[in-house]
Image (cartoon, helix red, strand yellow):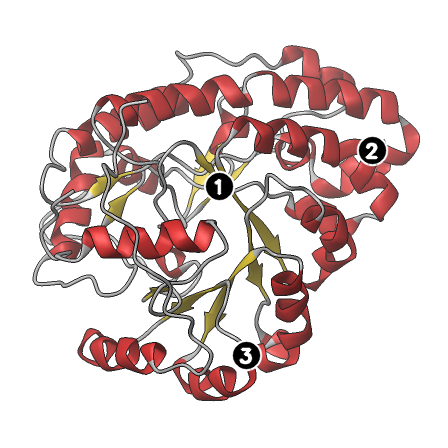
Amino acid sequence: MELQGKPDFDMAMRRIDAWFAHDMLDRPPVRFAEHNAEYSKSNTLAGRTWPDLRARWFDAEYQVDLFIDSLRGRTFHGETFPVFWPNLGPNVYAAFHGGELEFGEVTSWISHCLQTPADVQTLEFSHDNVYFRKIEELTQAALARCAGRFMVGYTDLHGSLDCVADWRDPQELCYDIVDDPAMVHKMLKVANRNFLPVYDRFDATLKAHGQMSVTWMGIPATGRMHIPSCDFTSMVATDIFDEFYLPSMLTEVRHMSHNIFHVDGKGMLRHLDRILAVPEIQAIQWVHGVGDDAPIMQWLPVIRKIQAAGKGVIVDLQLNELEPFISEMDPEGLYLCLAAAEIHQPEILKRLERWNGAKGAQIPQPRNPCPKA
């Protein structure tokens, strides 16, 4: 794949392929962007106006224009790629079934549309749903203009218990698990029914246009790449995780070829052993959070545990944490997310190549990075 501003695409993909296979070439992969950078500020183009924020989010031509404008003059170093993924916020899969999204500057929220668990019978997934049609429009608008410029990914999909929590409200769902677990299973059945068909529809659209499998995390892969997650389970005990989430998660990851589990914060650590025991999960994204949960150095035992389990691990670092982190850690299995000015990125890559303990494995031969199936 040849993209403006990404002359080393093939080599970057070989590093990622090696990382998914629990191997390392000349250095660990690194993406020069911090977690949730796209939600940190609102960017706009001059001369465009809308009656409200929803209209701005729904302006597909503008969203693609804005993304293309952000690429001007940039060189994408390391394993950083120009990726447009159609985005209406993290609750969009729930909204495909019902409920309304409220749009802010950089994200959106869903109205909790189930007053009682029994109201789940009022929800219905539809390809004619306004949010589903808009995601498809955004995807097609990007595909029409991406050639030689950027990659196009699929939207942020959250099924299972996170979807039910979007419909019901997380606190109410906690009560439901205690008061009416049978109804929670019925809500889960509705949430899970269309998850894989929706994923496959978007995946087939992208593959038909020669795209790889990629979404908000910006890590492309061949086959089917998925980011399983369930932030709701940070609030519950392991037996609840096992009963209400684990079966859904296993169904999802067994459908995919590449899985990176999103572990968001210390509340999820009680479930880490169960996640690490799933062979279909190749890697973990560890998000340690802010405030007292920063800096990263206090979480080195967690990162080493993930490495010891034979999983890759994505770690967010601040630039001033890089040297202390390197001095303490083995690079094998790591994938770094690091915010750094473009002018400094080439030197950082050279530093990573000198990381003590790098194996320097043989570089595999090039292959077609974008299979049609």
| Mark closer to the chain start, 3 or 1 | 1
* Amino acid type, residue under disc 2 in the picture: Glu
- Residue 106 can be seen in this image: no
Tell me the CA gap for discs 2 and 1: 24 Å
Is label 3 in contact with label 1 (beta carbons under 8 Å)?
Answer: no
Q: Residue at x 42, y 62 (%)?
A: 24
| Quadrant of the image containing the N terminus | top left
> Mark 2 packing: few (<14 Cα in 10 Å), some, or many (20+)?
few
Q: Is residue 300 left or right of residue 225?
A: right
Is label 3 in contact with label 2 (beta carbons under 8 Å)?
Answer: no
Q: Residue at x 18, y 30 (%)?
A: 143
For label 2, the residue is 243
Q: Residue at x 71, y 41 (%)?
A: 170
- Residue 147 can be seen in this image: yes
Q: Is residue 192 above or below residue 126?
A: below
| Mark closer to the chain start, 2 or 1 | 1
Q: Is residue 144 above or below residue 64?
A: above
Residue 284: x, y in percent?
Answer: 57, 54
Tell me the CA gap for discs 3 and 1: 33 Å
Return the mark for residue 288: none
Tell me the CA gap for discs 3 and 2: 36 Å
Return the mark for residue 329: 3
* Amino acid type, residue under disc 3 in the picture: Met
Residue 244: x, y in percent?
Answer: 78, 32
For label 1, the residue is 90
* Amino acid type, residue under disc 1 in the picture: Pro
Is label 2 in contact with label 1 (beta carbons under 8 Å)?
Answer: no
Residue toward you, 86 or 103: 86
Q: Is residue 255 left or right of residue 59?
A: right
